Image (cartoon, grey):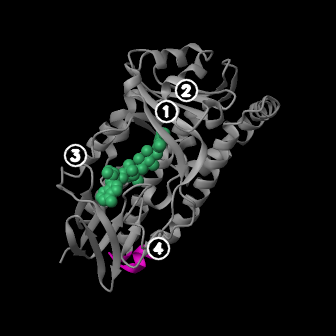
Amino acid sequence: MRARVAIIGAGIAGFAAGLACRQLDVEFQLFDAAADPLAGGAAITLWPNALRALSELGMRDLGSGLAANAITHGGIATERAAVLYELPLVWMRKQYGYFPVCVRRDVLLFAMYKALLRPTIARARVQRVFAQTDGAMVEGSHGRLAYDAAVIADGIHSQARHDICPVQPRPTRYTAWRGIAQGPVVDPATMWEYWGEGVRFGYASISPHATYWFATVNDRLLGGQDAGWDVARRLFAGFPPPVRACIAATPDADVLRHRVQDLPPGCPLAQGRIVLMGDAAHAITPNLGFGGALAVEDAATWLRAVRNVGVSPAAFRIYAAQRRRRVREMAYVTRQFGDVMQWQNQGMIHMRNGLFRIAAPMAGRLLWRRLLGSTGRP
Ligand SMILES: Cc1cc2nc3c(=O)[nH]c(=O)nc-3n(C[C@H](O)[C@H](O)[C@H](O)COP(=O)(O)OP(=O)(O)OC[C@H]3O[C@@H](n4cnc5c(N)ncnc54)[C@H](O)[C@@H]3O)c2cc1C
């Protein structure tokens, strides 16, 4: 008999887990509390590791489909547009087979949903998932249902992980805003990030007609944690023209606000026949744009483990062992980078920028190898 797996959450992690089930010919049931889980969000950058993992999960065409809008040039600059570092994107393409791409979240989710053959997503708020001798029990607004296994993928505020890992998100001292600017506001195929004093602005081209952007601001500069975009946007008035163009081409009402937070590292990634994936397991700060990528890497790793050992606690333990170090390292690196990138003191910023200009080209590839995971083409 085919194994039946419950997947809690129909976001990037849940859909990636569904894709793994499809590859394994395992039956799955998705649950989501939202009325339309495919809608909403802004966009995300998919680095080569994400495209490679999606390819392993059966979405081989995604990378090539998005290749027309691949990002081939970009880097980091000061708020006065002095270049600190150019991203080694051609090297990345050679080494990993892909340039990065930026894609609207709803477009990515719909592509994954289509690749899953448009499964039914049960509308239910799952409150508890717990291990049983031969499976997992899923309890919530739908009642109680037993499965052979369960994947917990209900995001950073996961209720379902509570029995396995009862942690709360950890705050940072900055807030992020995100938007999609319409029209040809920046050079196509580029991504840049500008560092100011306690403020940062980054953008990535989605297509010649749309640009994803984010802005992060220290709470100290906002006069409180609840300040809105109307307050934050003023801090970018002196930033280079592409920044001002992105802001001008995005209606204020469409700008999304997020308190930046992550999960304290160390959640067990498996218990019996239950695994945790994506932000429910290891939400990281979005400073380097790798949270979604880690979710699809999770599913690709789980796929390999289950392919070798079957839907069994042994496979789930292998998955956990193979992911533990990677997700812990990424949580640490992204949080540390974020703190340094948000520095506000002028002397420290001067020193940081000088060091970064010299060290980043030398150490950059080493760091990228760590960020992108194992080397080699798909
Ligand atoms: C500002 C910002 C910028 C980012 N930029 C990038 C980027 O450029 N690149 C990148 O790779 N990542 C980026 N990320 C991270 C990325 O968006 C997340 O890591 C990723 O979306 C997590 O996916 P997920 O499926 O684990 O969780 P989610 O997307 O949160 O999905 C969880 C799903 O579970 C459902 N759910 C919640 N509770 C329940 C419940 N009790 N019962 C049933 N269903 C439930 C929700 O409705 C939702 O559909 C960014 C994040 C932020 C905040």
- Residue 102, image x, y percentages: 43, 33
Asked if residue 76 is positioned above or below residue 146 in the image, the reply reads above
Mark 3: which secondary structure? helix
**What is the quadrant of residue 8 in the picture?**
bottom left
**What is the quadrant of residue 61 in the picture?**
top left
Kind of residue indicated by mark 2: Ala
Q: Which residue is depicted at the point 40% across and 65% down?
A: 302
Q: Which one is earlier in the sequence, the residue at label 1 or at label 2?
A: 1
Residue 4 marker: none
Q: Which one is earlier in the sequence, the residue at label 2 or at label 3?
A: 3
Q: Which one is earlier in the sequence, the residue at label 3 or at label 1?
A: 3
Q: From the viewer's perspective, is the residue at label 1 or at label 2 nearer?
A: 2
Per the image, the residue denoted by label 2 is 232
Distance Cα–Cα, label 2 vs label 3: 38 Å
- Residue 367, image x, y percentages: 66, 46
Residue 114 marker: 3
Which class describes the residues within 10 Å of circle 2: few (<14), some (14-19), or many (20+)?
Answer: many
Q: Are marks 1 and 2 in contact (CB under 8 Å)?
A: yes
Kind of residue indicated by mark 1: Trp
Distance Cα–Cα, label 3 vs label 4: 29 Å
Distance Cα–Cα, label 3 vs label 1: 29 Å
Q: Which residue is depicted at the point 63% across and 35% down?
A: 218
Q: Are marks 4 and 2 in contact (CB under 8 Å)?
A: no
Please state the extent of the stretch shown in magenta in the rendering.
Answer: 309-317
- Residue 199, image x, y percentages: 63, 30
Per the image, the residue denoted by label 1 is 177
Distance Cα–Cα, label 4 vs label 2: 45 Å
- Reply yes or no: does residue 137 show up in magenta: no
Q: Which one is earlier in the sequence, the residue at label 4 or at label 1?
A: 1
Mark 2: which secondary structure? helix
